[in-house]
């Protein structure tokens, strides 16, 4: 069917905004892999938190927010970006989030306990996006780094691309 080949729904082009933060570059790589994966399906903009301004949040169909996990949560730049979003800003916007993180199973017992207590950034970000009126497109996801500065675990960029396609496909299916 023709609609499945285009990035239009009802003659309107889908718009996706990806906002990320990254200290060592790993989360940025995931953000860009997500952007590339959905580019055939939507018009995509990838912006670093702090450089994203309020006007970019208007007339988007999807908002995807990604952060490194720092002490179980998002970075300060992502928290500030989220804080600046007005209440109910995301009516009719599909939202989701991702983080980069350690894998508990690769770590010793001490770190596993700490990771279990602090948890991760993505779920917290998604909760805030939903609180601001967004509807969850797909469950938030974490992508694994082997150490604080990376690298990403093998296969994570491909896994991010697959996850990202699901974000847009879900909307297209519900609109067809
Ligand atoms: C200050 C700091 C705190 C961190 N805390 C956590 C944590 O609580 N849980 C976790 O899984 N990873 C933690 N990490 C590792 C980050 O997940 C890792 O540095 C990040 O995924 C790398 O992403 P980036 O290259 O985009 O900065 C921490 C890293 C730093 C620098």
Image (tube, grey):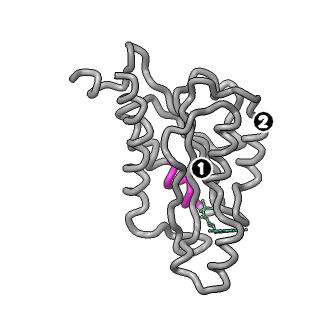
Question: Is residue 72 in sight in this rendering?
Answer: yes
Quarter where residue 154 is shown: bottom left
Work out how far the residue at label 1 is from the one at label 2, CA to CA, in angstroms.
Answer: 16 Å
Let me know if residue 27 is in the magenta part. Answer: yes
Question: Is residue 22 in sight in this rendering?
Answer: no
| x and y percentages locating residue 141 in the rendered image | 52, 54
Instruction: Say which element carries label 1.
Output: strand
Image height of 24 relative to 171, above or below = below
**Location of mark 2 (residue):** 84
Q: Which residues are magenta?
A: 25-31
Residue drawn at the location 62% of the way across and 79% of the way down: 112
**Location of mark 1 (residue):** 66
State how many labels appear. Answer: 2
Image height of 92 relative to 152, above or below = above
Residue drawn at the location 50% of the way across and 61% of the way down: 143
Let me know if residue 32 is in the magenta part. Answer: no
């Amino acid at each position: 069917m023709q609609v499945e080949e285009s990035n239009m729904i009802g003659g309107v082009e889908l718009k996706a905004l990806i906002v990320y933060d990254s200290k060592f570059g790993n989360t940025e790589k995931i953000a860009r892999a997500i952007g590339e994966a959905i580019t055939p399906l939507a018009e995509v903009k990838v912006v670093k938190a702090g450089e994203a301004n309020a006007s970019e949040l208007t007339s988007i169909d999807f908002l995807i927010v990604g952060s490194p996990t720092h002490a179980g949560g998002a970075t300060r730049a992502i928290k500030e970006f989220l804080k600046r979003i007005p209440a109910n800003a995301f009516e009719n916007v599909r939202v989701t989030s991702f983080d980069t993180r350690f894998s508990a199973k690769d770590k010793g017992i001490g770190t596993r306990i700490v990771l279990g207590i602090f948890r991760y950034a993505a779920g917290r970000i998604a909760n805030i996006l939903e609180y601001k009126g967004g509807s969850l497109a797909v469950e938030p996801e974490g992508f694994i780094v082997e150490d604080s500065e990376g690298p990403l675990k093998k296969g994570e960029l491909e896994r991010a691309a697959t996850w990202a396609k699901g974000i847009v496909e879900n909307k297209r299916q519900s609109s067809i």
